[in-house]
Amino acid sequence: MFVLCKHSKKLKDLPGNLKIKQNSLSIGIIVASDYQHQKVFDKTIIRKRVEIKMTLLSKEQLINFYRKMNRIRAFENEAIELAKMNLTRAAIHTYNGQEAIAVGVCAHLKEGDYITSTHRGHGHCIAKGADLERMFAELMGRKTGYCKGKGGSMHIADLSIGMLGANGIVGGGIPIATGAAFALKYKQTDNVVVCFFGDGASNQGSFHEALNLASVKKLPVIFLCENNNWAISMNIGKSVNIENISERAAAYGIKGLTVDGNDIAQVYREFGNCLEEVRQGTGPVLLEMKTYRLSGHYFGDNENYRSKEEVISRRQECPITRLENLLIQEYGVLPDELKAIASEEKAMVLEASNKAKLAPEPQAEDLWNDLFAQDFENITWQPFVKS
Amino acid sequence: MLVTFAQAVGDAMKEEMRRDDRILVFGEDIAEFGNIFGITRGMLEEFGPKRVRNTPISEMAFIGAAMGAAETGLRPCVELMYADFSLVAFAEIYHCIAKWRYMHGPEYKLPLVIRSAMGSSFGATGEHSNCLESLYMHSPGLLVASPSNAYDAKGLLKEAIRNDNPVMFFEHKQLYKTKGEVPEEEYTIPFGVADIKREGSDVTVIAIGLMVGRALEAAEALAKEGVSVEVLDPRTLVPFDKEAVRRSVSKTHRAMVVEESNKTSGVGAEIAAMMQEEMYDELDGPVVRVAALDVPLPYNIELEKYAIPDAEQIAAAIRKML
Ligand SMILES: Cc1ncc(C[n+]2csc(CCOP(=O)(O)OP(=O)(O)O)c2C)c(N)n1
Ligand SMILES: [Mg+2]
């Protein structure tokens, strides 16, 4: 395990099990954990982490995270139920296994901060505080949904909470986040943008162009790569030739960092450190969080490209289970307390879904709402005539 | 032999790959996974990882790479998952792939095929539902095929692979599961030869891709009312079989174009304009366009249906012409 570090002040904050290696370049990669690619954690490492965590996070905070992570999981489970009932359309990409990332990251964000999301965006929306009923309504194509039934699962946005939009185009959100960061800097705020994207997206030109642009303009954006090991059927080991995607930061002269994205305490701590710097105007950071996509790419995926054993073994690292273990073993929380929280969240999610099921469908006239900012009724060009 | 459209596409590639080892396929999720629609299933096993390759999600890179490989002696048949994502590689296709042979002369060959699934498919929404033929028709130097059934898909794809020109090959998602009769023996279908899918004498309906089936349904309904509709499937949009259209309208004197994409600047706009320039004397009335409403395709299934032409709408528009 080694650490490359640019800022010497950061070195003293590092956990004791990390060695420091002098960086010959001025820019470096920080690997904040002993995370080994595709390996299950061994107990001793988990223990060491716990010691760090205890000093940083209160039981209340962790319980709050547990609540939100369960909310996301329950939402996804219900989304799949709706899909089975044929109440949703197109693809549903669940966030199962990645909950610690959205929750740990969004817990730090304040009024005026923005996020951008991806096709796998439900977790980001929920963690940022989106309305569950409107989300469900959108999944069911209803008029009361976030896009009035015109967008669906892959296109939820909510400007009122700073959620700039999910995206159907892989890598499509990365330049958009960069532009939002530009606006924040232009307006001289201390707000930031968190740009969520996948390991697969990091191979798009948009990623590389946006990182360079954000770097040279020193923009307040955290490029947050959720490396879940897979991009549909493409394994990370075959799609990139480096150990950590964060190494790519060096090419753009920005800080790169890899953390264990299934460890909520580590996510919270490391993201918090980055955020503090970015708020102070030090420019963008590429923060990679390693995780694992526990479900198929979308509902209905045959998953013929990975073994059941792999999924079963990775399930042991499920961030919700890990947090449960932590709370029970280190914080003395009773399993029943956790069960109660999970069922409260589930009940809340089901209530939102049930309400959304009753929502009205959009009507044909709604088709031509919202296309342009102005009303073109008074001009003769009428693009929307159905013969 | 009754096969699905998806099988026909897969078979065309396999047969051609057996014949010529310069042909290789690459794209996203085509190897172990065998493509979202199962089209390339079995290809990795038969041809091995040298000729059947997954690529990272880097459309610009692998489409540009297909050009480089074609330029230097290979014959790539690449898969661009959905036509919507071809826009990530738009500059490579629209500029380099389309234009370089024209600039550099006849020794400069680009034998490459870009296959894409396209079109609406039950709420896939605006970023996963586009029919983009008209965009690529607009860049001289690209051949554009949009088959409507399994037989045409197989014959045209084999021709596309053998051809020394770059081909944009569009496969409608809703057609993949449709079945059609395909002969056991080898065949190819030349580009630029339209097919009359139904003969008729009152009106010519030029329909593209998925809309061919809907036009046939409309024709069937109208036959009961004593209206005789000819359904012409151009099969390839570049080159476009103008003579077949002329032959048909010289009989019917009325024409309609049906396409799934938005009406404005669509395929129908081009065909209608061409007809009024070149076949005006044959026409008894304006060429009618039936196309999607000019909105991004919505998620809600009823709205989506409403936005795209169906058989009833086509039939209603034909009745108005008579
Ligand atoms: C430009 C583009 N290419 C391909 C796709 C199809 N596609 C959708 S999701 C996906 C995989 C994305 O992988 P990753 O970025 O790792 O995100 P994950 O699904 O793992 O969350 C692909 C290839 C797309 N939507 N857009
Ligand atoms: Mg991924």
Image: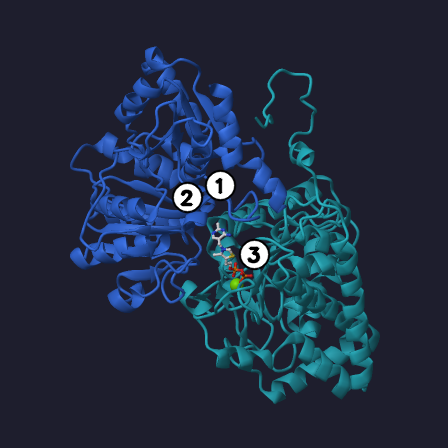
Chain colours: A cyan, B blue
| Chain identifier of the residue bearing label 3 in the image | A
Residue that sits furthest to the top in the current view: B281
From what the image shows, is residue A305 above or below residue A106? Answer: below
Contact, mark 3 vs mark 1 (Cβ under 8 Å): no
Gap in angstroms between the C-alphas marked 3 and 1: 16 Å
Both labels 2 and 1 in a single chain: yes
Q: Amino acid at mark 2?
A: Ala
| Chain identifier of the residue bearing label 1 in the image | B
Q: Disc 2 vs disc 3: which is toward the camera?
A: 3
From what the image shows, is residue B76 above or below residue A291? Answer: above
Q: Amino acid at mark 3?
A: Ala
| Chain identifier of the residue bearing label 2 in the image | B
Per the image, label 3 sits on a secondary structure element best described as loop
Q: Position of residue A178 (x, y in %)?
A: 61, 46
Find disc 1 in the rendering and name its residue: B130
Q: Earlier in the sequence, mark 2 or mark 1?
A: 2
CB of residue at label 3: within 8 Å of ligand 1?
no
Towards the viewer: B275 or A271: B275
Per the image, label 2 sits on a secondary structure element best described as helix
Q: Is residue B213 visible?
A: yes
Q: Position of residue B174 (x, y in %)?
A: 45, 48
Find disc 2 in the rendering and name its residue: B89
Number of numbered discs: 3
Towards the viewer: B76 or B150: B150
> Relative to A58, is A87 on the left or the right?
left
At horizontal 55% and vertical 62% (from top left) the residue drawn is A298
Gap in angstroms between the C-alphas marked 2 and 1: 15 Å
At horizontal 43% and vertical 69% (from top left) the residue drawn is A237
Q: Quadrant of residue B32?
A: bottom left
Find disc 3 in the rendering and name its residue: A91
